[in-house]
Image (tube, helix red, strand yellow):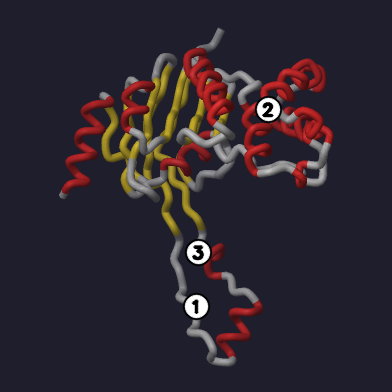
Amino acid sequence: MEKSSISVRDIYLDYPSTIYNRKTLKQTVFELAKLQKPKTVLHDVHALKGVSFEMVEGNRVGVIGHNGAGKSTLLKALAGIYPITGGEIEIKGQLQSLFDLAVGFEIDATGRENIAYRGLLLGESPKSIKEKTQEIIEFAELGEFIDYPVKSYSSGMIVRLAFAISTMIKGDILLLDEVFGAGDAKFMQKAKKRIMGLIETAKILVFVSHDFNAVRELCNRAIWLDHGEVKMDGDVETVINEYLKAMEV
């Protein structure tokens, strides 16, 4: 059986300026009426710049850096959500992503229907989704609301359902972005226990976090991203200490 691995070779990811420079009709009218200054022209954002690294089975990698350093962008590039504009990403093994959990729900569909939709998007077969549906419903603690439209749910209910679905699908490579709130204290205990189980069984972990204690506890390697570039890659304690020293300057 082929071993899981991640190979990232000199990747670039840019957000084109056209995304930011579009004007709304309201802005155009206000500018013509001289009620608002012309919008500042923004340039392309270079989110990742020449990033390279290799990960093999047994790697538990914490990705650290300031806000806007490119950490979450890197995770989404690995997951295939954001297309890279240069370089190459090669992944061997099944990915499991835990971030932006509540994104992508069909709000007019029921919770039960969304389990099927999201399960299919995550690569599950109709049969496996059917087998897991009751366990997902019980874990999310939604009761009769599972057959109500998602638009009637509170934000906490949506996150609980999304978490229950996403963590029911197992993967070899776990991409985890921060520790998030998934409901009340009781549910959070259950959610944390499940995340720890996923981490323990994953062959490779890539964990983005500002919580250095969590990185120290869960990881055996750290990558420091700075303005879209790899500043340092190595032992967890060494990388964190160097990052903290740089932040003091």
Kindly identify which residue carries mark 1.
39
**Residue depicted at 50% across the width and 48% down the height:** 85
User: Which is nearer the N-term, disc 3 or disc 2?
Assistant: 3
Q: Amino acid at mark 2?
A: Ala
Judged by depth in the image, the label closer to the viewer, 2 or 1, is 2
**From what the image shows, is residue 69 above or below residue 97?**
below
**From what the image shows, is residue 62 above or below residue 92?**
below
| Rendered location of residue 104, percent (x, y) | 69, 42
Q: CA distance from mark 3 to mark 1?
A: 13 Å
Kindly identify which residue carries mark 3.
17
| Rendered location of residue 43, percent (x, y) | 44, 66
User: Which is nearer the N-term, disc 3 or disc 1?
Assistant: 3
Kindly identify which residue carries mark 2.
140
Local SS, label 3: loop
Q: Residue furthest bottom?
A: 33
**From what the image shows, is residue 194 above or below residue 104?**
above
Q: Amino acid at mark 1?
A: Lys
In the rendered image, is residue 37 in sight? yes
Q: CA distance from mark 2 to mark 1?
A: 45 Å
Total marks placed = 3
**Residue depicted at 49% across the width and 19% down the height:** 196
Image marks 3 and 2: residues in contact by CB distance under 8 Å: no
| Rendered location of residue 96, percent (x, y) | 58, 26
